[in-house]
Image (tube, rainbow, N blue to C red):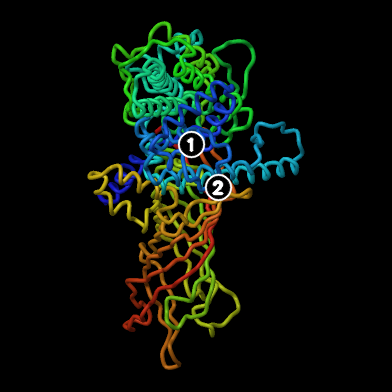
Amino acid sequence: MLAAKALPRLVAFLVVGVMPLVALSWVYPEHRILSLLAVQQLDSERRAVFDHTWELARSGDEARLCAAGADQGQGTAPSCIDWAALSAIAGDHSCSSLEMMETARGAPWILQVADVGAQLKEDLARIPMTPNPDALDRSADLISGAQRSISSEAVRAQRVNALRTADIRLQRADPQYVTRAGSNNAHFLLSRPQTTTTLADYAELSLRPGSDISAIGIYSYLHLSALQKASRLAAEPQLSAAGRAALARAALADEAFALHFLQDAFAAGHISGTWGDRSQRQGTHDYYNHNGLEVFTWSGGSRSVVLMGDAYMRSEDADFAAKTVRTSLEQVLDVASGRVPFAHAPAAASVPDGFDVCRNTGLPAREPELRLQPEQRQLFAATLLDTPVPGLGPGFGAMPRFRSEVGPFVGLAGTIDGRVVDGGFSDLQTRRGGVAGLDLSFRAGFGLDGVTSEAGDGLVYASIGLRSDGPSANRFNDTFPGSGSGNLSAAIPARAGVSLRFRMPFYVVPGDLLLLSPMYFIDRQAYAKMAVTAGNGGLIPWQSGWATGIGRFQFVLGRELGITLYGLDDKDQLVVPRADASSQARVVNFKSVSYDLPIFEYRPYRSFSSNQSSSVVFQLFAAADVPYGGSTVFPPGAPTPGLHTVWSLGVRMVFDWRHYFSY
């Protein structure tokens, strides 16, 4: 009993504790598109400076770094990394500018990541961008509304499946992908504390040393580093060729890393704020990215724009964000070419910045000689003026928050099923039959649906309930008189029992996360990678969900186990037919344990609102009903016949209701 109580806690500690809150911003190809647009929009003089600086930066790495800093024609299976791709590698596939550049220059797996990004770009380009039907006029008739809803779900399913495939491939190429991205709130904007907050107030909030790490804070920190290194390119003509190449590489690396977070500031789900529990942060992020958000910029005025979020970028979103990205890049190029005055910073290092945005939760203090000078503030104002004004923090006027199915829950599940059995418990009962059953159970667990992506399934729960089976359609003896079927003539009589059910993802084989739990205390990061992979469908991801316009399909063999304990009240009896004319039938008391394994499931309906969810699920399952404890009660003293396992295959329909708690 103690072990039974401890199991859910252990599962929660091991699985939920290591699952990160994954809230990425723009996906890889979207980050690269924004950087490509910024370079393409440069005037001829600045483009020449950019090309020259990039040529210096790739010195010695010509095979790995592309000749063109912004290779518009690059497709799948790229053989090199261009500068535009660095902003996509930053943050999501590296934790510092230094790590980003080292990865781009030498890590073999980054080309696989670039290939995934290129393929995702092609996949997303084929999917139309349609608004959520709930946001449209509902005056249409019932049939038109249903058709529109199915069409919208089909489009959404295409996007979910494209992201599912990309996420699985990215996790394989870069095992730290998910854990790195979910480590903190670096990709989000800090919420405004009040409506009177000005850009200067917000800059002070985001940029002072020790302030909570945020997209604007990281951008400004790395952009200043890039400007200071660019100042050395302009003011130190005595640099050797190798020294100038290293400095050019460091300046462009810091700017690319900074631009990743500036680009994040234009994703709808990252403007709405990071406050709230995990479920609220994840749900709010996903909702606004999908549905869009009307925003104003710090430049003021009554003109607003609607922005989308990751994997939902439209051409107008890209054009709007690329203007600010271009302005930032122009500043670095202007300083490097001496086009604008900027204080020489001889203390600026000739290597990319090593500030780790994954492990740190606050901005570091800069060395006195590398701090922002008052006359340099105008450069940052020029870029930040056109960034969206973030939402308010908790309180009146805050943007509506939305929850995701993440966190602890309790619930009820009602089930109706039918299965075909291969016979009865006696060797003499070989005719197949059917059994119908009902189950009502109480569930408790942790919802991890869609933590890594909407196609993921990290659901963990245990349930206990009552089950009732009707009599089987096959008779205990084919020669039994009468044509009716019922409990008296059934090979398997009507029974009731206690039902138990457990569900948990696995890495390679069912239950391996629990068996390998000691690894959590030895190498938490390695265990977290396993848990994330398990939630994405396992090492061999054949158990990932597949979305369609009419529902979600998934292989679930090994993720779920049902156990039913029959005969606990010692009242279950069956009739064993006589073996020959000289013997007689026997009445046997027995108990049994039924084990069922769902194989495949289809979920046509699912709804989530605030803190409750409901869904209808159809499952194909296989079961084994194992008898034990048989004893003959009639005729008295007769030997007890041998009973064997009854195998069955069936289909069940489950109505699943859950209530989620804050997490």
Question: Position of 81 compared to 138: left or right?
Answer: left
Name the residue nearer the viewer: 655 or 351.
351
The C terminus, quarter of image: top left
Q: Is residue 472 above or below residue 638?
A: above
Residue 225 in the image, given as x and y percentages of width and height: 38, 20
Residue 607 in the image, given as x and y percentages of width and height: 56, 41
Pointers 1 and 2 in contact (CB under 8 A)?
A: no
Q: Is residue 21 above or below residue 415?
A: above
Q: Which residue is mark 1?
A: 82
Residue 319 in the image, given as x and y percentages of width and height: 61, 26
Name the residue nearer the viewer: 522 or 657.
522
- Tag 1: residue type? Asp
Which comes before the other along the chain, label 1 or label 2?
1
Q: Is residue 607 above or below residue 223?
A: below
> Given the current orientation, which residue lies at the most extreme bottom position?
582
Name the residue nearer the viewer: 209 or 279.
209
Name the residue nearer the viewer: 589 or 560.
560
Q: Which residue is mark 2?
A: 161
Badge 1, how many Cα within 10 Å: few under 14, some, many 20+?
A: many
Q: Is residue 70 above or below residue 586?
A: above
- Tag 2: residue type? Asn
